Image: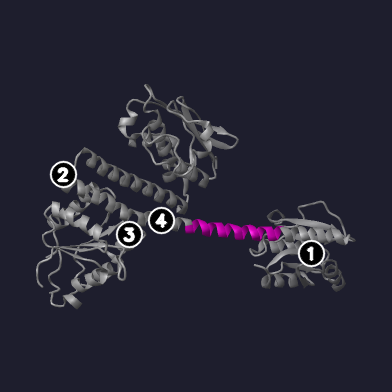
Amino acid sequence: MNIEVEILLVEDSMNDAELTIRALKKNNLANKLIHLEDGQEALDFIFAEGNYSERKIENIPKVILLDLKMPKINGIQVLQKIKSDERTKTIPVIVLTSSKEDPDIQECYRLGVNSYVVKPVQFDKFLDAVSQLGLYWMLINQQPK
Amino acid sequence: MNLKPKILIVDDKPENLKALRKVLKDLDIVLVEAISGNDALKATLRNDFVLALLDIQMPGMDGYELAGILREEEKTAHLPFIFISAVYTDNLNVFKGYENGAFSFITKPFQPEVLINKVKFFVDKHQQDVALFELNEELKNANKELDAFTYSVSHDLRAPLRSINGYAQMLDEDYGPKLDIEGKRIIKTICDNAINMGMLIDELLGFSQLGRKEVQLRKINMNELVESVFIDMDKSFTHKAEIKIGKLHEVEADFGLLRQVMFNLISNALKYSSKKEQPIIEVFSEEKNGDIVFSLKDNGAGFDMKYYDKLFGVFQRLHKQKEFEGVGVGLAIVERIISKHGGKVWAEGKVNEGAQFNFSLTIN
């Protein structure tokens, strides 16, 4: 259970997840990706609890891609937990949202989101967006050691 | 708000109060009595009145003085009065603050019907005001709900569209080599339509947002604004058009919103004149009846005045997609912004000869 995870994708829509993973794959960024489908599972994974209690919490993902609209525990709540815990608050979190008018975006910034990406309807734009953020956060951005 | 309207009656003589009560007994109202100015002021603290009947000759504080004080209090500043006096006066300026609300005189001795009618008038007016206020509140709420609905529809509709478009594209990428031209055409049609619907949703979202936006007035140099819009325009449109901008009036308006108006009108003018040999776009303004009227004239495709009532509707188009692209929200946005500013929008057009769009803004 201590495989290295680079990208944690938290997305309840299987379709959006498939599109996102495909875009990352095109840039060879999806080798160490784990996809979780709801907020609770994401928190368990990040904080090494429940099904993931074998995991070491120090093995933090390089970046978390987080959908906002999820049943039960939503993206905002996940973000809040991550950003208010010393052990996890330096993990870059990118919020994925359906529209730039999402009223939650303000709240995300308040909670300390690192970036947010509007999932475009156009597939090629979606590919571009995901590739760019993948490349930036995986390769360019220097995280604190 | 189904409480009976309350009316204050002020007179230092109990028999007069009794007489008033008797005259007004058939009206569906509540009478609150006061026997002095001070008494009346106390009563206004505890009650919300729709009208006050004031005796003028009272010891201590007389009716005019009382009226003046009531006009100074926020709660009663617009309370209408009927003065009951033994002497007739046609001097309207008899008490302080008279200009803030309605009032009327009645001279003693009076016909009961005259007083009843006057009281009825003010009570009816009050009830109409209340009804109007409630209707207005309902309308505001309905608008808010509509905005929220539009927002969530627009938001949630994007997700399936993303899938339709994404998977069609995936099909093309992964299985394209196995498809013939017709198969590829079908995939492209799916993608095009998904993208088009995405644009519709975005426009709709933008339009619904306008409803929530507050107008922030500031002085705007319209020449600068219009020039900046032309700079932002697609150069493929502007390069061949002859653009004439007159000396434009300054206005007070919301900068962002007004820029959006100009952007939409100018891009329309450029779009619909783009097929002309020599497109000409004119922007000018003039003062008319206390308003400033801005106009945009082009010599483009124009429109048939027969369909004028559709011109400013949401998702209404007077041209085929093949001729001129668009989703039909631009002019609806223009209309909404200008009416938010209290102005009007109108247009004239002639097929293949051009169109002129005008909007007015009040000077102050």
Alpha-carbon distance for marks 4 and 3? 15 Å
Respond whether the residues carrying marks 1 and 2 are from the same subunit.
yes
Secondary element under disc 2, as helix, strand or loop, is: helix
Residue at mark 3 shares a chain with residue at mark 2:
no
Instruction: Please tell me which of labels 1 and 4 falls first in the chain.
Output: 1
Judging by the rendered image, the residue that carries numbered circle 2 is: B178
Decide: few, some or many residues near mark 3? Use Cα within 10 Å; few <14, some 14-19, many ≥20: many
Q: CA distance from mark 1 to mark 4?
A: 54 Å
Q: Nearer the viewer, mark 1 or mark 4?
A: 4
How packed mark 4 is, by other alpha carbons closer than 10 Å (few <14, some 14-19, many 20 or more), is many
Compared across the picture, whether A67 is left or right of B306 comes to: left
Residue beneath label 1, please?
Answer: B54
Marks 4 and 2, how far apart at CA? 41 Å
Task: Please indicate whether residue B79 sits to the left or right of residue B356 in the image.
Answer: right
Mark 3: which secondary structure? helix
Task: Report which residue position mark 4 lands on.
Answer: B151
| Residue B109 screen position, x and y as percent | 90, 61
Amino acid type, mark 4: Tyr
Which quarter of the rendering shows the N terminus of chain A?
Answer: bottom left
- Find numbered disc 1 in the image and state the secondary structure of the residue it sits on: strand
The kind of residue on which mark 2 rests is Lys
> Which residues, given as a range, are shown in magenta?
B125-145
* Callouts 4 and 3 on one subunit: no
Whether marks 1 and 4 lie on the same chain: yes
- Residue B131 belongs to the span the image colors magenta: yes
Q: Amino acid at mark 3?
A: Ile
Quarter of the rendering occupied by the C terminus of chain A: bottom left
